[in-house]
Image (cartoon, helix red, strand yellow):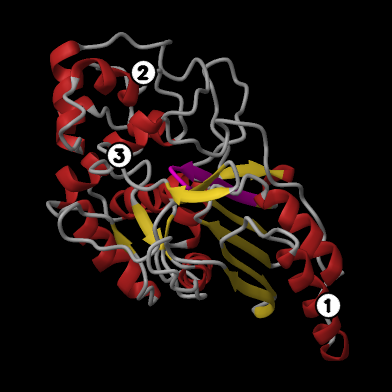
Amino acid sequence: MARQGALGAALIFAAFSPVFIPDFAARAAQKSSLEQLSKAPKFHGTVLMVKEGKVVFQAAQGYCDIRSQKKLEMNSAFNLASVSKQFTALAIAQLVEAGKLRYEDKIQKYLKLPYPEITVDHLLGHRSGLPDYIELAEEEWDTDQLLTNADILNLFRKHKPALAFKPNSKYDYSNTGYAFLASLVEAVSKQSFADYLKAHVFTPAGMQDSFVYQPGKSKPLVKGMAYQRNQLVGDDLTWMDGVVGDGGIYSSALDLRKWQEALFQGKLISKAGLKMLFQPGQLNNGKTTDYGYGWVIDEEGDLVWHNGSWAGFRTLISYQISEDFLTIVLNNSGYEDNDGLVEKISKDLQ
């Protein structure tokens, strides 16, 4: 099972042009939208839509986990899967802005890896050529033991797997690159990845529900689930969940709204630094990619988004900049049609 991200599968978000709902129409639109949610009984999760700073739709449906059957709430924290990558990218951007790191720096300088050509920029934009760490670990690691970022670094140092292509000659979505970036944050900041994000992202943004998963310390209330033969079963964390950077962050829909607002209001990084996050990657041949630093870039930069898939969690955050419209969908029941649900709800809101 691999962590899937924004471009690991087909584009799951269909762009739309939502409009502000006048107060007299809001109640009817909300009712219709809630009916759309109820028509997806296998969706256990939360949905939040915000237009120009005002909530136009929010709802929570289903359970945190099978055993307790505690109902999900808007502040329930889900495993973000690959949506976590935008936090990793922001941490790197902050360190660059602080003068502690450069995008053009070779990662070998900090992580002692056998890949002298790979830069920080290559990792952020999925242009490094690094092979998949999960495949390497499945071959060379005792899967009865928890895998961590330090273990991944040691596996790559020991086995020196060949690059799939010359760095920056091609785009290929890479969880390995973002796991290395989390290790880079730790090496440069002299803090654990969890402590760094708490101090420099979660606390400044007021994100009280958010944390980096730490085995033995963290106790998430929301568990991954999935439907098998119409029966809801557990589908939660695995031996790979000691790895962070490519995933591993828990957050709520309400906190992700705070994240987006803090990011765009300059609370976490300067406007120039923010612009770098949404700059499409450029390959050696001059062609550009549709991925910036932790975000997919669509519609000439007007639509930025990311999705994630890990165990029973399916996640999506999307922001239409010109419309100032934020969409967040988090589910823990393996529901595969977040994009379809968004489209149906958005039509009711128009």
* Residue 50, x across and y down, in percent: 66, 73
- Whichever of labels 3 and 2 marks the residue nearer the N terminus, that label is 2
Amino acid residing under circle 2: Pro
Check if residue 152 falls in the magenta segment. Answer: no
Residue shown at the point (46%, 75%) measured from the top left: 75
Q: Where is residue 1 in the image (x, y as percent from the top left)?
A: 42, 30
Q: Where is residue 39 in the image (x, y as percent from the top left)?
A: 75, 61
Q: Is residue 297 above or below residue 121?
A: below
Residue at image mark 2: 131
Residue 181 bears which disc, if any? 3
Residue 234 visible in rendering: yes
Residues under labels 1 and 3: Cα distance? 43 Å
Give the residue at mark 1.
29
Disc 1 residue crowd, few under 14, some 14–19, many 20+, Cα 10 Å: many
Relative to 66, 14 lies left or right: right
Say which of 201 and 214 sits in front: 214
Mark found first going from the N terminus, 1 or 3: 1
